[in-house]
Amino acid sequence: MLVSFEHVSKLYGKVYALDNVHFTIDKGDFVFLVGNSGAGKTTILKLLLREVLPSSGNILIDNLNLTKLKKTQIPHVRRNIGMIFQDFKILFDRTVEENVAIALEITGRPRDEIYKKVHEVLHLVGLAEKINLFPVQLSQGELQRTAIARAIVAGPKLVLADEPTGNLDPTNSCEILKILKEINKLGTTIIMATHNVDVVNSMKKRVIALEKGKIVKDQKQGNYK
């Protein structure tokens, strides 16, 4: 087991963003979080990143209780989590290589190790020939592949994806899914929040459906209804 939510609730004022949510995710799983806007998907991702704390309950990653972390421990935990955003969060004054390398530079890795890992991961996501380009020279799909490379270059155990195909056309969405499937095959656990019905139904992975902060379905090889 890699992730565990133990009867987690999150209140904003008097409104439940999450209401007594309980689930576990094993190492190597690929899980979709689905539901309408405001259902609680993004709140789950923020809790896993320790951006916010639950109002009640416990959240564990690799048996480490996030609710009891000291502030000094949070950066170490986040280094084992890759994050992919809908709007990419790319630095436009840096090249593809430099954008990806940032994730390793902040950990103090040696320069030769950074160079090797960055080139390996850019090959994996199909950007080996774009390494010296700047973001303005890339398509939307290539920007998201750069963001994925940055999220996985440090070898995280867990990758969180918040609507990673939300700004992409169907062709680019398909390419991004292929990359995520490949990353998952290599052993990385992926939790992906999405509204995309076609994406979920085509993948046949585990689906956790949320409605008004509650889990209404948790189905292996599920679909989006």
Image (cartoon, rainbow, N blue to C red):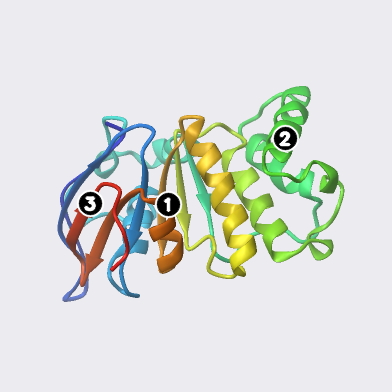
Q: Quadrant of the N terminus?
A: top left
Q: CA distance from mark 3 to mark 2?
A: 36 Å
Provide the residue designation for mark 3.
219
Residue 159 in view in this figure = yes
Residue 217 at x, y = what percent? 19, 59
Q: CA distance from mark 2 to mark 1?
A: 28 Å
Relative to 166, 121 lies left or right: right
Q: Earlier in the sequence, mark 3 or mark 2?
A: 2
Q: Residues within 10 Å of mark 1 (few under 14, many from 20)?
A: some
Asked whether the beta carbons under mark 2 and mark 1 sit within 8 Å of each other, the answer is: no
Residue 182 at x, y = what percent? 55, 38
Residue 118 at x, y = what percent? 72, 35
Q: CA distance from mark 3 to mark 1?
A: 13 Å
**What SS does tag 1 mark?**
helix
Q: Earlier in the sequence, mark 2 or mark 1?
A: 2
Provide the residue designation for mark 1.
203
Hey, which quadrant is residue 107 in on the image?
top right
**What SS does tag 3 mark?**
strand
